[in-house]
Every structure is written in structure tokens, then in C-alpha cells.
Image (tube, grey):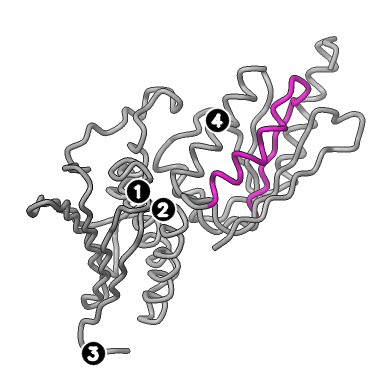
Amino acid sequence: MPLDIRVTQDKDPRNSGRVRVALDGSLDTATSPDLEKALQPLYVRQLRVLVFDLAGLRFLSSAGIRVLMTARKELTDHDGSFILTNLQPQIAKVIEIVKALPGVSIFRNDAEMDAYLAAMQKKVVEGGQAS
Amino acid sequence: MPSQASQLELELRASRDEVARATEAVRLYCAAHGAAEELIHDLCLAVDEVLANIVLHGYAADPAGRIELRVTAEGSGYKLDFIDRAPPFNPLTATPPDLAVPPEERTIGGLGMVLVRALMDGLAYAREGDANHLTLHREGARSKG
């Protein structure tokens, strides 16, 4: 099964630094190098929030998990947020088994994720920090 | 539904694309035998993980490496046999990753076997002459989540 990767930079200026990566198909031994290549150019200082929309992801093996782990580290090393959303049940099961992504925000759907990000943004604004 | 045990036999070169080819073949074979989606998923995942270890670590991605994969339907369950001629390596006795250690610091290849152990019901390894032979069993009906 191939892997389709769609990267979208958030155009809303309030969400600058937010990137969404939608994955469709299979993230496995054969396709994980493609994701690794696609993510490389995203690892810039301005990246604040990286969202993986996994609604179309039907298969995930440890090769793919390793690429996600690297992405997670890129974000958390710079105090950013690494988010997975819309996980199919077999994907959630695999992630749970290897516990490879501790402290990662995993959401069942976009509504949950948007609520979380809005709350986080509110905290930042109220904290008086520059965003 | 076939009434006798039947088998899928594949000979693979040691490359990532061959891992994908094998997984697809296993998917089709098990689906043709009426396996449930979750069972198909778990078998395909075990295949991806074991083959990845053999290709990337056993053969160090040398495309001259050869792997034999046999899938045998046994009742409602399946048996997977992996035979390779890479240097001796028993994945069952290799040190498992400590899941409490930060993921980036864990052993390469360790995550794959954690998944295989969680998804399969039986695992056995034998060194046979110059070959590594790994056998996995998975029952059709499972009480394990």
C-alpha cells in the first residue's frame, strides 16, 4: 500500500508556525523514507505546532513510528506541540503497544484538537508571552 | 473456504520494496481465506517488522540477500515461517528495548519485536545450518486485546 503525504501550512496569521501533515495509506518499512524526506524541510525554527492528520492512515509499522518520534523530538526540543489526530483504531493500538510517543497529544478528531489548541493559545496570550 | 491447509510461498530480495510486496501478498492471501480485518492487519504488521529486521539488520540492505516467507493457513489461524541466510541472529533473545527509556535512545530494531510479541501467539527460532528460521503462530480467535 503506498503512502500519500499532504503538507499544509496554516494560512491564518494567528496560527503562524502551524503545519498540518495528512497521511493516507501505509506508513511502513517501504514508505517511511518518503515521509522522512517530506518532513525535513519543515524543521525550521518557526515551526510551533505539527499536526499529523491520520484519518486516512490504515497501517503503521515501527519504521513509521521512528520517523514520527524524530518529528516529535524536533518539536519538543523547541517547546513546540506535536499532535496526532483522527487515528484509526488499529493505529492507536500499535502506538499504545510500543509507548513510543509519551506526552504526545492524541485526539480522536479535529474538534477535540481545535479546542485544545484554542485553549493553549488563550493561555499564551493571557501569560503575556509573545507568540 | 478451502478445507485443507494451504500455503503462500514467497522468495524475496533484501530490499524495502520487497517488504511491501510481501505484505501485500500476505494481505491478499489472508483476505482470500476469509480472515477478519484485525487479523489481517496484525499478520501484515508482523511480516513488515520481521522482514524489516532481516533486510536492514541481518543483510544490511544488501539486495543480494534472499528471504523465504511461507504463510500457512491452519484452521482459523496462521503460521508464518521466515528463512534467511544472514549472519546468526535470534530476535527472541535480543535485548528488548526498555520502554521507560526515551524512545530516541532505545535499541534499533527493538520496537519491531515488541509489536510482534504483542500481536502473535507463538514464536520460535532455530538456526538450521547456515539459515535463521523464525516461526510465528497466530490464532484466529483471540482473547488478548
Residue B113 sits inside the magenta stretch: no
Mark 4, secondary structure of its residue: helix
**Rounded to the nearest whole Å, what is the CA distance between mark 1 and mark 2?**
6 Å
Q: Which residues are magenta?
A: A31-55
* Mark 1 vs mark 3, CA separation in Å: 34 Å
- Which quadrant does the N terminus of chain B fall into? bottom left
Between discs 2 and 3, the one toward the N terminus: 3
**In the image as oriented, which residue stretches furthest toward the front?**
B64
Q: In this image, A108 relative to A121: left or right?
A: left
Of mark 1 and mark 3, the one earlier in the sequence is: 3
Residue for badge 3: B3
Mark 2 = which residue?
B15
Q: Amino acid at mark 3?
A: Ser
Residue drawn at the location 39% of the way across and 61% of the way down: B44
Label 1 in the same subunit as label 3: yes
Determine the chain carrying the residue at label 2: B
Task: Name which residue type carries label 2.
Answer: Ser
| Residue hosting label 1 | B55
Q: Secondary structure at mark 1?
A: helix
User: Are circles 1 and 2 on residues that touch, CB within 8 Å?
Assistant: yes
Please, is residue B33 above or below residue A41 in the view?
below
Q: Secondary structure at mark 2?
A: loop
**Marks 4 & 3, CB-CB < 8 Å contact:** no
Mark 4 = which residue?
A70
Pointers 1 and 4 in contact (CB under 8 A)?
A: no
Mark 1, mark 3: which one is toward the viewer? 1
Q: Quadrant of the C terminus of chain B?
A: bottom left
- What chain does badge 3 belong to? B
**Quadrant assignment, res B97:** top left
In whole angstroms, how far apart are the C-alphas of marks 2 and 4?
Answer: 23 Å
Residue type indicated by callout 1: Val
Describe the element under mark 3 as helix, strand or loop.
loop
